[in-house]
Amino acid sequence: MADDDYVYDEETGEWMAASDLAARNAAADRVDVRDAVGNLLTDGDQVTLIKDLEVKGAGQTLKRGTLIKSIRLTGDSQEIDCRFDGIKGLVLRAEFVKKRT
């Protein structure tokens, strides 16, 4: 017998390995974030803007085609956290970016 502990899963009503249950729960908690054309975004991706965006509080406009490097996912299916020169705490909507391949 394996060294793994078994736990009762109340959703399925079955006994399963604790590691399998943990992996399934982690996959269920993950949120898929997709860009304007439907590409799946992940942490560290580079994206380009598809529209001019005015940044509130910074008095600056990010132009279409601007490259944003190293994005971070926030857990929201439509928001990404990123950095840009001179703007701290920039959060963009995923509908306004396109993944750079």
Image (spheres, rainbow, N blue to C red):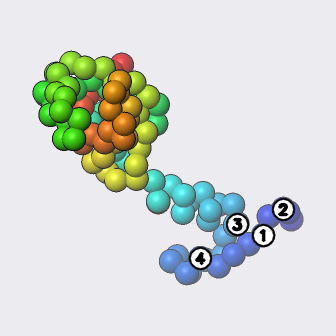
Q: Nearer the viewer, residue 65 or 14?
A: 65
Q: In percent of the image, x 25 and y 20: which residue is there? A: 66
Q: Which residue is mark 1?
A: 5
Q: Which residue is mark 3?
A: 17
Q: Amino acid at mark 2?
A: Ala
User: Is there CB contact under 8 Å for labels 3 and 4?
Assistant: no
- The span from disc 1 to disc 4 (Cα, nearest Å) is 13 Å
Q: Which residue is mark 4?
A: 9
Q: Amino acid at mark 1?
A: Asp
- The span from disc 3 to disc 2 (Cα, nearest Å) is 9 Å
Q: Quadrant of residue 16?
A: bottom right
- The span from disc 2 to disc 1 (Cα, nearest Å) is 8 Å
Q: In percent of the image, x 19 and y 41: which residue is there? A: 56
User: Is there CB contact under 8 Å for labels 2 and 4?
Assistant: no
Indicate which disc, 2 or 4, sits on the residue closer to the N terminus: 2
Q: Residue 13, position in %: x, y?
A: 56, 80
Q: Nearer the viewer, residue 75 or 82?
A: 82
